[in-house]
Image: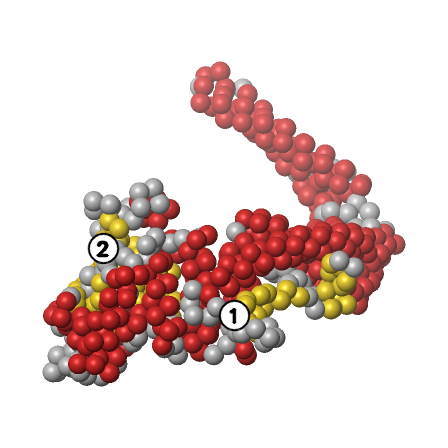
Amino acid sequence: MRIRSLGVIDDAVVELSPGFTAVTGETGAGKTMVVTSLGLLLGGRADAALVRIGARNAVVEGRIAVPEGAAAVVRAEEAGAELDDGTLLVSRTVSAEGRSRAHLGGRSVPVGLLAELADDLVAVHGQTDQQGLLKLSRQRQALDRYAGFAVAVPLGKYAEAYRRLRAVATELEQITTRARERAQEADLLRFGLEEIAAVEPRAGEDVELAEEAERLGHAEALASAAAVAHAALAGNPEDPEGVDAGTLVVGAQRALEAVRAHDPALAALCDRIGEIGILVRDVAGELAGYADDLDADPLRLAAVEDRRAALTGLTRKYGEDVASVLAWAEQGAARLTELDGDDERIGELTAERDALRGELGALAQELTDARTEAAERFAAAVTAELGSLAMPHARVSFDIRQSEDPEGVEVGGRTVAYGPAGVDEVELLLAPHPGAPPRPIAKGASGGELSRVMLAVEVVFAGTDPVPTYLFDEVDAGVGGKAAVEIGRRLAKLAKSAQVVVVTHLPQVAAFADRQLLVEKTDDGSVTRSGVKVLEGEERVRELSRMLAGQEDSETARAHAEELLETARADV
């Protein structure tokens, strides 16, 4: 990795060994920035506070060797990244304003993609991870991870059934808790539909009645006007001397008929006058029929107005016109059918809920059985590892239990609480020495013991779910003496099958490393390119002496440092 303007690091290159690399240095020298840098390359959260004061941005660049055909390679190539001789070039830039950019294989990519790749490439563990291991949910997740498909398959089926049950239960609760509101809504709908049915409106009826009322209300005026118009067109029998339009048109046509043969234009006009005469006679006839058919019956007018009043009562409540009223009735009938069907729906949902609870209980039992079987193997493997970490008499076990809950699901004849991951509460127990009762590691383990338990758990994972690289940030805190030597020995063993990077203050651990990197500041408080260097020979002995006694030139410390190195080499 190359690190620029990150925290106390001005510009430094970190060369990690394929095996076991130990990163050491004085407190505050910037060792944690090495971990932070790797975290950024793996999609960790960017923070403007990481940028070195006075710099515009911090940049971390890394070259990661990836196995051919690995899932990380496939995902990277899908994102358009290109491999460089079997390695992925990764970079992350964090601006002083907090903005972050990521590049992978020469392509700009979302930061989330780096986090996806990290799951397959690196396992990062620090003191916060130790605290995480104290949480019951993390302990259950660790057991499930160890169990693999034996738990993953039934857990997937359980999770799907759990989601269906939650959806059914939510719908059932909504329907039952709204029973009063639904009943009120149904009553209002029934009243409205009955009111509309009693009137029996027809589509367009309101328009027809309005026209008829207008006509009936002016019947006398309409009849008088029709009579006057008829007399003007066809003549008045009571006034034989009067001149009507029909007579005048006939006279005009006769005048032209006598001379039409002499001029085609005049003949055309004569024909048009004939058409006018026909139209006048037709209109006169219709006016006579209109007058005869016109009904001035006041009883009919009253009936029309009563009918219009009934329709107006509906349009005030249910729509602007009769068409809107009929549309409301259609929608109301559909909604009423739906509401009346709620009781039936409640029965269906109740039956489905009970069936799903039964299915969930069976899957939960299968899940519990798989976890119980895996827990025995996992505990035995971690216990064996603790024997290699200076805890030969320690015993690890799991307590898998369920809590009674009358609202839960039935498992093994008991009604127990359930959640999205099953019915099990999984707790990791530690008996540090013979005769000691197993106690939760949160209560029964010291800081050093907790560090070793976590390391043992990770070593067990390495055999079942390996990743290429493991990074440990001071997980050896609280450990010393023989236990520290055993931790160094175990990390060296893990490094035979994976790359292991450890930030440590313990010389017993650093002595087992294949490569030791020293992080040191310059006089101005920064870490420059020369501030991260590989220690070999005399330099490594001096650094181990400083870690042992705080004195690089102490003969006793130097002798002890050389002895540590010889022990480590002999062990390897």
Residue 505 placement: quadrant: bottom left
Q: Amino acid at mark 1?
A: Ala
Left of 499 or right of it: where is 146? Answer: right
**Picture quarter with the N terminus:** bottom left
Q: Nearer the viewer, residue 331 or 238?
A: 331
Q: Residue furthest top?
A: 261
Q: Between disc 1 and disc 2, whose residue precedes?
A: 2
Q: Nearer the viewer, residue 123 or 54?
A: 123
Say which mark, if any, is on residue 394.
1
Say which mark, if any, is on residue 126.
none
Label 2 sits on residue: 63
**Picture quarter with the C terminus:** bottom left
Left of 265 or right of it: where is 282? Answer: right
Q: Nearer the viewer, residue 115 or 332?
A: 115
Residue 179 placement: quadrant: bottom right
Task: Give me the C-alpha separation between circle 1 and circle 2.
Answer: 41 Å
Image location of residue 503, percent across then percent down: 29, 70
Kindly report which numbered mark, 1 or 2, lies closer to the viewer in this rendering. Answer: 1
Residue displayed at 70% across by 69% down: 403
Residue displayed at 73% across by 68% down: 404
Q: Residues within 10 Å of mark 1 (few under 14, many from 20)?
A: many
Image location of residue 273, percent across then percent down: 56, 28
Q: Amino acid at mark 2?
A: Arg
Is residue 550 visible in the rendered image? The answer is yes
Image location of residue 86, percent across then percent down: 24, 45
